[in-house]
Amino acid sequence: MPVNVSAFMPAELNLVLVGPPGAGKGTQASRLVKDFSLPFISVGDILRANVKEGTELGVKAKEYMDKGELLPDDLVVDLITERLKQPDAKEGFILDGFPRTVPQAEALEKGLTVSGRKLTAVIVIEVPDEDLIERLSGRRVNPTTGRTYHIKYDPPKHEGVDDIDGTKLIQRDDDKPETIANRLKVYHDQTSPVIGFYERQNTENKALVRRIDGTREPDEVYRHIRALVATVRLEDTL
Ligand code: AMP
């Protein structure tokens, strides 16, 4: 008798990473991408690419990004809704930096429901503000490849230049001190309520929201996240 293989197929893995700026979402997501072969969708990266190319969206986005403010919801919602319809996101996705407001979370929910999909887990990476300020203000980036360093925790071999291609490292405009303070305020005011929105969907049998201590070493944080994702994936197939 033929075996019904689809019964054993893992369900879609639709993940949202939430955390304050500098919590390490991007670092952790890039590892998840490799291990689980899912597309990584970062609103910040999409916007930065638009800024670099000087598109209409990029010009508009830069005004908000330089001040550490969020773009209007409708702009990012349309961007993400379209992105999630791409063929590479059919088996799942890792969303970084979206949703960042409750209306964005509601729009995402609506968009997913319409296409018969739902989130598998909302992973919240928690780090206190003092640590974030230190992490963000010391961050330096290779503007060409996006590779990041930290002046104290992960310095380049030669000050100010990339180890691999020798490009001069820069500080992101939004990693300047006054902008950092505003980004943290925006996170607490507008994004923290998103966690509450998802927590209300936790049931007795299944927690949608999973909190991770992001103060530990990146490798350790990742071990926790990977174990967690493996567990939620298994739970979803049961
Ligand atoms: P990030 O790299 O995720 O910290 O994002 C950089 C900047 O892009 C933010 O400070 C915002 O200006 C903008 N941005 C990123 N994600 C969103 C979002 N979901 N809604 C509105 N603005 C966003």
Image (cartoon, rainbow, N blue to C red):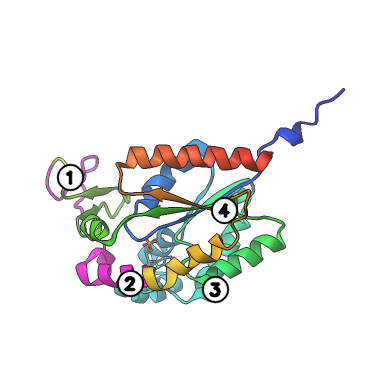
Q: Quick one: label 3 or label 2, which is nearer the N terminus?
A: 3
* Residue linked to disc 2: 185
Residue type at mark 1 is: Pro
Cα–Cα span, label 1 and label 2: 28 Å
- Which residue does the image show at 60% across and 41% down from the upper left? 233
The amino acid at mark 3 is Pro
Q: Is 6 above or below relative to 216? A: above
The span picked out in magenta is 158-187
* Mark 4 or mark 2: whose residue is earlier in sequence: 2
At 43% from the left edge and 72% from the top edge, which residue is drawn? 190
Q: Which mark is residue 155?
A: 1
Name the secondary structure under disc 3: helix
Q: Earlier in the sequence, mark 1 or mark 2?
A: 1
177 in the magenta segment: yes
Q: Which residue is mark 3?
A: 103
Q: Choose mark 4 or mark 1, whichever is in front.
A: 4
Q: Give the position of the C terminus as an image quadrant.
A: top right
Q: Quadrant of ligand 1?
A: bottom left
Residue plotted at (42% across, 45% down):
30
Which mark's residue is nearer the viewer, 4 or 3? 4
Residue 5 position, x and y percent, is: 76, 31
Q: Quadrant of residue 108?
A: bottom right
Relative placement, left or right, of 120 versus 54 is right
